[in-house]
Amino acid sequence: MKSKDIIAIGIVFSFLNMNFLPAFAIADSELNKADKKAQIKKEKMLKHRFKRNKKYDDSYKCEYVNLDFWNGFNDENLNNYINLAIKNNYDLKMATLNVDEFYQATRIQFANELPQAGLGFSPAYAKVLNQSADWMFAFPMIINYEADIFLKNRDKTRSSKKLYEGSKFDERAAYISIASAVGTVYFNLVKLNDVIEKQEEIVKLRKQIYEIMLESNREGLVSTSDTVKANKAYVNGTSQLIEYKKQRTKLLNQLAVLVGDSPENTGSYKISKLSDIKYSKEIPTEIPSEIIINRPDYLKSEKMLEKYGIDIRVAKKEFLPSINLSGLALFLSQSGGSGLFSSGNGIYALAAAAMLPVFTGGKRIANLRLKKVQYDKALENYHKTNLIAIQEVNDALITVQRDNEKLNEHKKQLKLETEDFGYTQQRYNHGIISKLDLLQKQENLLSVNQLLSSTTADCYVDYISLYKATGSKI
């Protein structure tokens, strides 16, 4: 072998193990520019989804949450918070980025199915035997390709794609969950506003009752024990009012986080009155099985089952030989020599190799058994998910049914209490009963109104639970 050939081969091997690590020094004055570019870079990072799908837009997010269901409440404020959550909620942004992450992982795996080519430039200053030292320049071109005749790499790509498809179902589940959380928090706020309004009236009544009892006690008409009881009722009502307001503040803070806003801005949040909200659509009493099997968690469990099935096939193919094809073109020239890319300065090689691992310490057998175990776990999770879906839908249906029945009974109770208060008011106007009796009946009426408000809002929350249990397909 000529000395020139020896040097060429040495340059090739040194080039294959060479890492180019450029270093950049960033002055403090450049940091502000970097901060300004950060937001632009973030936006560009998300826009790659448009590149891979020209028809891509945000409409799929609205399909996830089924805006038609939320429009059924005829509440503009609620719709506004749902839309804000879709756009600004950070959990949803992370769910979308997770989809992109799995998509890129799939592309990386797909790259293993394609030939890998590399170009380089390697200068060297060498002295061989009795020759004088001189500069030499090499321009290697290397191509490697694993012939996928057993479709092992293709199956690995299919397996990775199942993870990507499963992540899209996770994204859909996240949107449904966040929309449900927004709706639940909102209706609890609606309920608390109404309850607080009536509780403030109850506290005023109890204060009047206590003052009347106190005056009557001074005149010897009412016992001290009854006066203390009236005072206790007044204090307990005030304490309950404080608790309701505390809960409202906490719920407003939760709503702010859900819509991607600062809790400091909750003072400007608009919450509709309970009396202005009427759900105009019909709530089903039965749910067909087609809706249950379209839940995102159910669909993801199917994808995971398919993925581990593919992984078993890949594990079996690991027992087969791998066939690699390699090509090399190297152009080598000394300083002052002929042209770098002339035929006289070129070295060309084409090689093929079939490798079959003979002994790996049981690694391949253990890997195959591992994949089978993972498949069995995915199968059990698939069955469990199916049962949980049926349970959640049935639980939501029975809750809606029973709470609606309870709501109807509370409406009847309110009607009777209203009639009773009307008769009490007539007796008071005729001087038959005292003002104290009238105030106590008025407090009872307000308490029943509170109960009705709470049950009405709970029914709306039940609708949201059914919405979530059906994967938004109610």
Image (cartoon, rainbow, N blue to C red):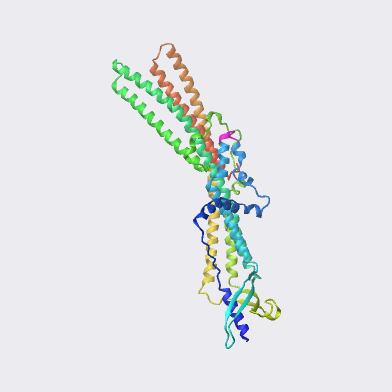
Left or right of 348: which side holds 411? left
Q: Position of residue 291 (x, y in %)?
A: 61, 46
Magenta span dominant secondary structure: loop
Residue at far bottom of view? 130
Q: Position of residue 343 (x, y in %)?
A: 71, 79
Residue at far top of view? 430
Which range of residues does the magenta coloring cover? 72-77
> Quarter-wise, where is residue 234 in the image?
top left
Q: In this picture, is 436 found above or below 12?
A: above
Would you say residue 455 sits in the magenta stretch?
Answer: no
Q: In this picture, is 455 found above or below 380?
A: above
Q: In this picture, is 112 found above or below 127?
A: above
Quadrant of the frame with the N terminus: bottom right
- Front residue (pair 33, 382): 33
- Front residue (pair 255, 445): 255
Q: Position of residue 422 (x, y in %)?
A: 47, 17
Query: What residue lies at 37% left-to-right and 21% top-to-bottom?
Result: 209
State whether residue 469 appears in this view.
Answer: no
State whether residue 69 appears in this view.
Answer: yes
Quadrant of the frame with the C terminus: top right
Q: In this picture, is 48 found above or below 414?
A: below
